Amino acid sequence: MSVKILPVTPLNAEELVAHRGYRAKYPENTALSIIKAIDAGALFVEIDVQFSQDKLPIIYHDTTLSRVSGFEKSVFECNRDELLGYPAYEPDRLGDTFIDEKISPLEALVSILEANPDVKAFVELKDESIEHCGREFILDSVQNILHPVADRAVIMSFDYSLALGARKSGWPLVGLVLKQWDDLYLEEVRAAEPDFIYTDHLIIPRECDLTTIEALRDATLVAYEVGSQALGHSLLDRGVDMLETFEIEALLAAD
């Protein structure tokens, strides 16, 4: 007797975050990837921010240029004007298809959000740049740039002290990324009163009742990295609120 497999229903755009833009098909953290994610239906996008030698922000994940740009140099050895001339095309993964796409400054995100008023962005400030520039400098710089879209830009980090600083400075939307699940019980995490908490879905304890955790009562729980509708539905059923994915179009698509 054959078993009938029911189709998995598409997920709602309100539940999904395009992680590094539409990374499945385009080079991550580029203006192209962000725009293509929005074109595919994303209402939320996530990007990473590093700082250059002259302490200016770029949309980039790594501290070296090798994986995304194909050059053996450190981000921290280059001024921003130099960095903006480098390609951001992920040659090992995508070949030369997007070699004309360049590294973008953080200001590019502001322009994209201004052109797409229904879209919100999660802006992750990387630990290495926090060490390079200092928390106060990073926060001041990013807040000044994102000010025109402050109501739609979540400042987030693995650095709990930075998230707390963003909250104390009055930034309207703050997020933190868990290093480990039990950090939910840290006083610094609770004091930050994050609007969003991000976690690798693999570290959520299997039998955990998420409704009993005080830190999650007023925060939106976002799980990453989710690559299928089936996994997404199972996480939502367990009480996760939102899902980060490289596969934004596939998770939104009907079978």
Image: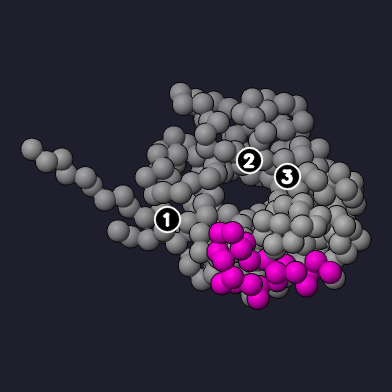
- Label 2 element class: strand
Query: Image quadrant for the C terminus?
Result: bottom left
Spot occupied by residue 126 in the image (x, y as percentages of width and height): 76, 48
Give the spatial CA distance, label 3 vs label 1.
25 Å
Name the residue at 61% across, 29% down. Answer: 181
- Label 3 element class: strand
Magenta: main secondary structure equals loop
User: Foreground residue, 221 or 123?
Assistant: 123
**Residue placed under numbered mark 1 in the picture:** 251
| Span shown in magenta | 82-104
Spot occupied by residue 43 in the image (x, y as percentages of width and height): 54, 62
Relative to 113, 132 lies left or right: right
Spot occupied by residue 99 in the image (x, y as percentages of width and height): 64, 72
Name the residue at 41% across, 49% down. Answer: 228
Residue type for callout 3: Ser
Residue 49 falls in which quadrant of the image? bottom right
**Residue placed under numbered mark 3 in the picture:** 157
Which sits earlier in the primary sequence, circle 3 or circle 1? 3
Q: Is-magenta flag for residue 64?
A: no
Tag in front: 2 or 3: 3
Residue type for callout 1: Leu
